[in-house]
Image (cartoon, helix red, strand yellow):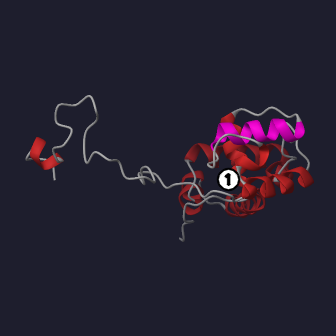
Amino acid sequence: METVTLSVLTRDEMEQRRLAAAEELQRGLTQSEVARQFGVSRTTASRWRRALDGNGVEGLRKRRATGRPSRLTPEQLAALRETYEEGPRALGLDSDRWTTGRFAEAIFLRYGVRYDPDHAGRIIHRLGLRPRRSVGEGPRFSPAVPYGSRYSPNTFLSRSEISPTVA
């Protein structure tokens, strides 16, 4: 029995997975076997079984995605890409570096649409303008102080000098 590797699936891929799981359930595989084979929890396999029993295969098809529609048009989003590449100073902002707050302000200045800085960051990443940092990558700058903080008495000591057990 082959298992699916964990990854981020598109809505179409998720639907294909549900339909393939439905075939296996109809062939007689147990919910636990289907869960293992498709890399999902037993609860998910149970939900698929209930949908299959209640509405047939149609119950497992994807439905229209809900959610609030975007307040920016695709043309405005494309123009935001150009705005980002021009830099904040082109809009009269007082810095050469984009932050999510400055980008949210730029959106408001250009289109009158107010976004929270967190959502402005999502827009930046969705447009592929700044790659997400992987977990644990840390800051992109190197701190002037090798370890500790300005409040620590051990500011200039390395980790191994502070505690010999720490590598």
Give the overall secondary structure of the magenta segment: helix
Near mark 1 (Cα within 10 A), the count class, few <14, some 14-19 or many ≥20, is: few
Does the segment drawn in magenta span residue 101? yes
Give the x, y percent position of residue 144: 32, 47
* 1 shown above or below 122: below
- Please provide the residue range marked out in magenta: 99-111
Please state if 4 lies on the left or on the right of 67 as rendered. Answer: left
Amino acid type of the residue tagged 1 in the rendering: His
Q: As rendered, which of 7 and 90 lies closer to the eye?
A: 90
Give the x, y percent position of residue 14: 72, 57
Label 1, on which residue? 125
Which residue shows up at 72% across the image and 64% down it? 20
Please state if 49 lies on the left or on the right of 74 as rendered. Answer: left
Does the segment drawn in magenta span residue 74? no
Which residue shows up at 63% across the image and 56% down it? 130
Judged from this view, the residue extending furthest toward the left is 164
Which residue shows up at 52% across the image and 54% down it? 133
Give the x, y percent position of residue 10: 73, 59
Please state if 145 lies on the left or on the right of 129 as rendered. Answer: left
Judged from this view, the residue extending furthest toward the bottom is 2
